Image (cartoon, helix red, strand yellow):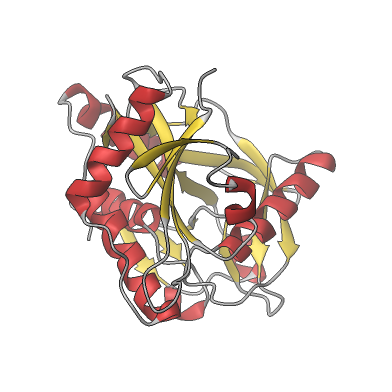
Amino acid sequence: MRGDRVCIDGTLRERNGTEFDTDRLLSSGYLYQRIHTLAHRPLHLAAHTQRLTESYRALYGTVPAADEETLRHEIALTLEENRYPAVSNLVTLYLFPPRDGRPGPRMVSCTETLVYPGYTLWHSRLKAVTLPYDYPFPEHETALSRIAHTFAGEYARRTGYDLALTENGQGVVTGAGENPLFAVCGDTVLTTPVESGAAESVLRQLGLELCREAGVSVREETLTVETLRRCDELFCLTPQGVVSLLEWDGRMGFNITAEKLGALLERAARKKNFEFGIR
């Protein structure tokens, strides 16, 4: 059965086998990164590793026991063992809290096969609703943030929307669930800075870099509920690429900038360049 094995500290194991109960691990605290892989090669792995190291140090006071080359090997091994095709796939890398003063275990899990190879402009535009919900340490990608985003996203879909926009209870819009959100106001793209509650992520840096490469003016500025009422366009960055929003909170938007970024992604794909110079 495809997807029934995970890699824990370099060793392949059955999900919820006798040696490791992965459900129990995932019910604890953890840090995570969603990583786009192409031909079983993780994209932007250095940036993902840096994000995890910074978060682990900030929240647990130590650094994880994994380097980039080790993670690259473990990701490829897990995809091959689970017979994922050599196209674009999504894996999730988890780092668990320290135990007895030592870094906790790490786990690589296959998530899904993506629709398109590399990054692209998503084929359909989505409808979103803004929901108020908050959680601690919003600048990091954690177990608690993921639970909050999952719950809000499921609620949005039950009520006829495709996704939930995160409003932190103080009027600040920090993202589109676990994905970074960008608003187009006039000729400038705005996105909430980390200091105002946005999660620092590889996708956030990718969105900023795409705007710069496309020649689009981009600025980190706090997005508010009021900003969303007057902006011209909203889009978010997901592991698949750019997703344009058709409607949010009853307001219809354009997709001019999203189309421009999508054209940049298509040119990059033709050149077999799926990685951008993000930090």
Q: Position of residue 261 (x, y in %)?
A: 34, 40
Residue 263 in view, yes or no? no
Quadrant occupied by the N terminus: top right
Q: Position of residue 228 (x, y in %)?
A: 62, 61
Q: Residue furthest right?
A: 159
Using residue 10 as the reference point, say whether residue 5 is left or right of it.
Answer: right
Above or below, 44 against 221 in this view is above
Q: Residue furthest front?
A: 18
Residue located 39% across and 71% down the image: 55
Quadrant occupied by the C terminus: bottom left
Q: Position of residue 8 (x, y in %)?
A: 41, 46
Q: Nearer the viewer, residue 123 or 83?
A: 83
Residue located 23% across and 35% down the image: 274
Q: Nearer the viewer, residue 91 or 210?
A: 91
Residue 131 in view, yes or no? yes
Q: Nearer the viewer, residue 263 or 32?
A: 32
Above or below, 163 against 95 in this view is above
- Which corner quadrant of the image does residue 50 belong to? bottom left
Q: Nearer the viewer, residue 141 or 12?
A: 12
Residue located 40% across and 29% down the image: 89
Please count the marks in the image.
0
Above or below, 273 against 279 in this view is above
